[in-house]
Image: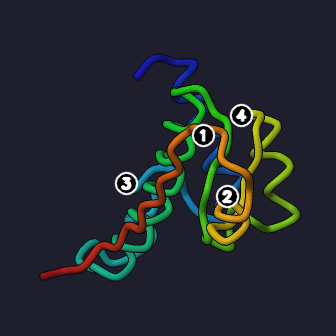
């Protein structure tokens, strides 16, 4: 990942998760390294960040998610400023007239099995 890509990733992460450490290594230094729950939460935050990073990297447009964190008033405008387009909930996207573009939604869940 180039420097510009990493800076964009950091900016997205800090918009979505300002109060949490960006690097897992730094996060784990403050906690027990064997804590699966804490690692899982960090990983979920990282996945959120990378999903939006990919959204920007592949052209932006309409970002569809029911994740409350992306839809918070305090964060939504800042995220849209990075990518353009819009961030909408699934129901809102389904109610919009079709532009011929496919709308997909993925729900990620890390399960320790």
The residue pinned by badge 1 equals 10
Nearest to viewer (mark 4 / mark 2): 4
Nearest to viewer (mark 4 / mark 1): 4
- N-terminal label among 4 and 2: 2
Tag 3 near tag 4, CB within 8 Å: no
**Residue at mark 4 to residue at mark 2: CA–CA distance:** 14 Å
Q: In the image as oriented, which residue stretches furthest toward the left?
A: 113
Q: Residue at x 76, y 38 (%)?
A: 85
Disc sitting over residue 83 in the figure: 4
Instruction: Look at the numbered disc 4 and give the secondary structure of its residue.
Output: helix
**Residue at mark 4 to residue at mark 1: CA–CA distance:** 14 Å
The residue pinned by badge 3 equals 25
Q: Residue at x 32, y 78 (%)?
A: 32
Disc sitting over residue 16 in the figure: 2
**Residue at mark 2 to residue at mark 3: CA–CA distance:** 19 Å
- N-terminal label among 3 and 4: 3
Tag 2 near tag 3, CB within 8 Å: no
Q: Residues within 10 Å of mark 1 (few under 14, many from 20)?
A: some
**Residue at mark 1 to residue at mark 3: CA–CA distance:** 15 Å
Instruction: Look at the numbered disc 2 and give the secondary structure of its residue.
Output: helix
Left or right for 17, reference 58: right
Q: Is residue 25 visible?
A: yes
Quadrant in which the C terminus is drawn? bottom left
Residue 64 vertical position relative to residue 34 in the rendered view, above or below: above
Given residues 91 and 83, the one toward you in this image is 91
Left or right for 50, reference 67: left
Residue 44 vertical position relative to residue 102 in the rendered view, above or below: below
Disc sitting over residue 66 in the figure: none
């Amino acid at each position: 990942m180039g420097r510009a890509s990493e800076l964009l990733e950091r900016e997205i992460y800090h918009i979505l998760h300002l109060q949490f450490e960006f690097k897992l290594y730094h996060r784990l230094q403050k906690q027990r390294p064997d804590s699966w729950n804490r690692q899982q939460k960090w990983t979920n935050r990282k996945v959120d960040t990378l999903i939006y990073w990919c959204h920007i990297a592949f052209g932006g447009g309409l970002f569809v998610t029911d994740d409350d964190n992306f839809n918070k008033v305090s964060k939504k405008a800042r995220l849209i400023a990075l990518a353009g387009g819009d961030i909408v909930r699934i129901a809102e996207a389904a109610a919009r007239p079709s532009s011929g573009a496919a709308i997909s939604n993925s729900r990620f869940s890390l399960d320790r099995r």
